[in-house]
Image (spheres, rainbow, N blue to C red):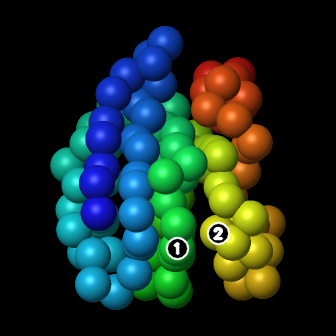
């Protein structure tokens, strides 16, 4: 799994590539945890390079969502493939997380 982080107009943007499953969910969690500072107010996870997500990956997303809510911060996901979007929809987690079609729209959603 490849994870890239950068700042875009004050928003922390994290891009995940490949698969997010039991084999690498802890690594993904640890990378997110290290990247997200306690002063963070806006985070976008760009999933354009993600080809698969398992329940272990969904669990990490929920953990980060809860952490950011405690910090009064906003989280949005963007650029989900049809397969990954289906997992979010089927699990019901798509109703809990702000999912945007593009990175620009996700940044606008968390910045507003």
- Quick check: 3 above or below 18? above
SS type, badge 2: helix
Q: Residue at x 40, y 42 (%)?
A: 14
Residue in the foreground of this view, choosing between 97 and 16: 16
- Quick check: 51 above or below 79? below
Asked whether residue 70 is in view, the answer is no
Q: Residue at x 65, y 55 (%)?
A: 80
- Residue 11 is left or right of residue 48, and the answer is left
Is there a contact, CB below 8 Å, between mark 1 and mark 2? yes
Q: Position of residue 69 (x, y in %)?
A: 53, 51
- Quick check: 30 above or below 44? below
Q: What residue would you read off at disc 2?
A: 84
Q: Residue at x 74, y 65 (%)?
A: 82
Image quarter of residue 75: top right
Q: Position of residue 86 (x, y in %)?
A: 75, 74
Q: Residue at x 27, y 76 (%)?
A: 24
Label at residue 95: none
- Measured Cα–Cα span from mark 1 to mark 2: 6 Å
Residue in the foreground of this view, choosing between 24 and 60: 24
Residue in the foreground of this view, choosing between 13 and 53: 53
Q: Earlier in the sequence, mark 1 or mark 2?
A: 1
Label at residue 52: 1
């Amino acid at each position: 799994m490849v994870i890239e982080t950068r700042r875009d107009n004050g928003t922390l943007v994290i891009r995940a590539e490949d698969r997010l499953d039991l084999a690498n969910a802890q690594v993904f969690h640890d990378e997110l945890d290290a990247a997200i500072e306690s002063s963070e107010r806006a985070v976008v996870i760009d999933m354009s390079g993600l080809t698969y997500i398992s329940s272990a990956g969904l669990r990490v997303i929920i953990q980060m969502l809860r952490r950011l809510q405690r910090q009064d911060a906003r989280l949005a996901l963007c650029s989900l493939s049809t397969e990954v979007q289906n997992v979010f929809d089927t699990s019901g987690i798509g109703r809990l997380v702000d999912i945007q079609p593009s990175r620009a729209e996700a940044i606008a959603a968390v910045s507003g």
